[in-house]
Image (cartoon, grey):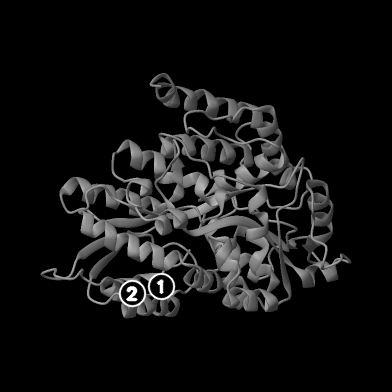
C-alpha cells in the first residue's frame, strides 16, 4: 500500500503542470499545487506522459505544480505543513489510510459536497466498494481510489518444478504453504540455504502483511469507525504465531525481519521461491523475471483475505470553487476506464472500477497476461487497510509488536496485548465523543 517508484518525479513534475484549461472568460490559467508520493512502484515516465498528454489535449492551459515529497508519510506531512504555512495544495494523492488524520485536521472536503450532476454522482459510485472503504467516513466519500493494491503471492514456477511440485498449483491454504515451503527450500553442499521457500516482508509495512494473516484467520484488526482495534483477539494472536512458525517451526522462511524494499530483488534473484508483496510490483516482476513465474491469491486459513492498500486522491478545503472544478477534471480523467486500464497495465496496480476491466485495452492485456486480474479477483475477500484515528501511533504499536515477535523478543500473546493496551487509550476519546 501498500506500495516503490522513484522515476515518476521528473515526468509528473514536467507534464502535470500543463493539465487544466482555464474556464471561459478567466484572466489566466488556474494554478494548482498537487502533492504526490514518489515511492509508488514501476517506471512510469512514459505512461504518465501519455496520460497527461491526453488530458492536456482535452484541457489545455491550466498549470499544475506537481510537488514530489518522498513516500506516503513524507507527502502527508509536507502537504499538511503547506496547508498551515499559507501555501496550500489543492489536491494530492496520499495514503488511503490518511483519511482520519486529514478529517481531524479539517484539511479535506467530501466529494459528496462537490459533485452536482447525475453523471458526477454516478461516477462517485463507479468504483469497487472494497476500494472505497478506506475513503469513506460516516457515509461521505473523502478519498477517490487511484493507485490501489492488494497483497498477492508471487511464485517461481521453475523452482516448483525443481522441487517436484505442480507449477500450476500454488499453496491455497496455510498448511500447504508450510508443506510446499519445506520442499522449496534449497541448500548448498555445506548445508547453507540458497533458496527459501517463502518470504513475507516485515519491515516498512509489517502491519499490512499481518492484516492478511489476520483476515485469513477470520478477524479484522479495527472497526469501521476508526476508534477501536482488536490486536489481542485470539484469532489475531494465532495469526502472528503462524507467521513466527513459518521460520521457527517449519523452517521455510529466514528468522528475523525481512526487508520490504529488497524482497522483490531477492525473488527475482532466486533467493526465495515465494514472496508476498503488493500487486503494484506486478509489471516490474513481469519485466524483470528470468524464470517462469505465477501470481495467485494469498492462501487461506479459515478464509482467503488481504487488505487493500495504496493511495487515494483528496481535494483540500482551502480551494476556490474554480480550483475544485479543475481538480475534479484531473481526477475524473485519470480514473476514467481507459486511463485506469492503461495505469494498471503499466504499473500492476488495480484498475479501480469494473468498467476499466471491460475496456478493450484491458481485455486484450488480460488475454495475454491473465495474472493482471488476480488482485481484482481477490477484492471480494479483501478488507480495508488498517486505519484509525491517531493512525501513525496506533499502527506503529502493531508494527513494533510484530517485529518484537519475529526477532524473539516477545511472544505473540504478550506483544499483541501490550499493543492493544496502548492503542485503546489513544482511541477511547474518539468513542466517548459520540
Look at the image and tell me whether residue 19 can be seen: yes
Single out the residue that lies furthest toward the top: 432
Count of number-bearing discs:
2
Residue drawn at x 49%, y 66% is 41
Numbered mark located on residue 7 in the image: 1
Of 337 and 8, the residue lying toward us: 337
Query: Residue 122 appears at what percent x and percent y?
Result: 46, 55
Of 26 and 378, the residue lying toward us: 26
Residue that carries the numbered disc 2 in the rendered image? 10
**Vertical position of residue 144 compared to residue 385: above or below:** below
Of 315 and 326, the residue lying toward us: 326
Callout 1: 10 Å neighbours few (<14), some, many (20+)? some
Secondary element type, mark 2: helix
Label 2, label 1: how far apart the Cα atoms are: 7 Å
Image side of residue 19 versus residue 357, left or right: left
Query: Residue 303 appears at what percent x and percent y?
Result: 75, 43
Amino acid at each position: 500500500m501498500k506500495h516503490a517508484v522513484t522515476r515518476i518525479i521528473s515526468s509528473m513534475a514536467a507534464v502535470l503542470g500543463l493539465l487544466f484549461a482555464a474556464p471561459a472568460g478567466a484572466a489566466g490559467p488556474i494554478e494548482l499545487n498537487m502533492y504526490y508520493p514518489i515511492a509508488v512502484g514501476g517506471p512510469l515516465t512514459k505512461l504518465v506522459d501519455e496520460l497527461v498528454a491526453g488530458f492536456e489535449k482535452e484541457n489545455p492551459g491550466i498549470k499544475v505544480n506537481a510537488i514530489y515529497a518522498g513516500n506516503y508519510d513524507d507527502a502527508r506531512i509536507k502537504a499538511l505543513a503547506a496547508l498551515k504555512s499559507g501555501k496550500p495544495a489543492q489536491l494530492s494523492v496520499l495514503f488511503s489510510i490518511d483519511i482520519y488524520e486529514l478529517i481531524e485536521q479539517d484539511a479535506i472536503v467530501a466529494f459528496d459536497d462537490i459533485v452536482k450532476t447525475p453523471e458526477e454522482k454516478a461516477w462517485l459510485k463507479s468504483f469497487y466498494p472494497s476500494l472505497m472503504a478506506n475513503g469513506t467516513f460516516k457515509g461521505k466519500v473523502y478519498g477517490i481510489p487511484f493507485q490501489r493494491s492488494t497483497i498477492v503471492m508471487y511464485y517461481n514456477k521453475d523452482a516448483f518444478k525443481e522441487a517436484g511440485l505442480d507449477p500450476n498449483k500454488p499453496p491455497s491454504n496455510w498448511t500447504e504453504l508450510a508443506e510446499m515451503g519445506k520442499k522449496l527450500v534449497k541448500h548448498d553442499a555445506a548445508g547453507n540455504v540458497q533458496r527459501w521457500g517463502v518470504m513475507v516482508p516485515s519491515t516498512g509495512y509489517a502491519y499490512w502483511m499481518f492484516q492478511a494473516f489476520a483476515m485469513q484467520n477470520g478477524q479484522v484488526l479495527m472497526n469501521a469507525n476508526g476508534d477501536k482495534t482488536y490486536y489481542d483477539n485470539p484469532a489475531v494472536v494465532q495469526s502472528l504465531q503462524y507467521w513466527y512458525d513459518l521460520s521457527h517451526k517449519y523452517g521455510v522462511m529466514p528468522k528475523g525481519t525481512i526487508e520490504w524494499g529488497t524482497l522483490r530483488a531477492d525473488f527475482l534473484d532466486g533467493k526465495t521461491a515465494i514472496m508476498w508483496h503488493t500487486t503494484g510490483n506486478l509489471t516490474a516482476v513481469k519485466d524483470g523475471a528470468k524464470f517462469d513465474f505465477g501470481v495467485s491469491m494469498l492462501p487461506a486459513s479459515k478464509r482467503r483475505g488481504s487488505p487493500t492498500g495504496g493511495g487515494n486522491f483528496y481535494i483540500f478545503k482551502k480551494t476556490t470553487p474554480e480550483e475544485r472544478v479543475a481538480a475534479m477534471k484531473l481526477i475524473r480523467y485519470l480514473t476514467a476506464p481507459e486511463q485506469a486500464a492503461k495505469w494498471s497495465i503499466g504499473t500492476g496496480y488495480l484498475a479501480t472500477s469494473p468498467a476499466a476491466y471491460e475496456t478493450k485495452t484491458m481485455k486484450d492485456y488480460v488475454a495475454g497476461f491473465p495474472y493482471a486480474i488476480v488482485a481484482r479477483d481477490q477484492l471480494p475477500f479483501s478488507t480495508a487497510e488498517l486505519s484509525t484515528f491517531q493512525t501513525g501511533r496506533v499502527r506503529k504499536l502493531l508494527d513494533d509488536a510484530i517485529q518484537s515477535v519475529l526477532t524473539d523478543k516477545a511472544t505473540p500473546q504478550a506483544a499483541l496485548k501490550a499493543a492493544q493496551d496502548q492503542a485503546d487509550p489513544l482511541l477511547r476519546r474518539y468513542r466517548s465523543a459520540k
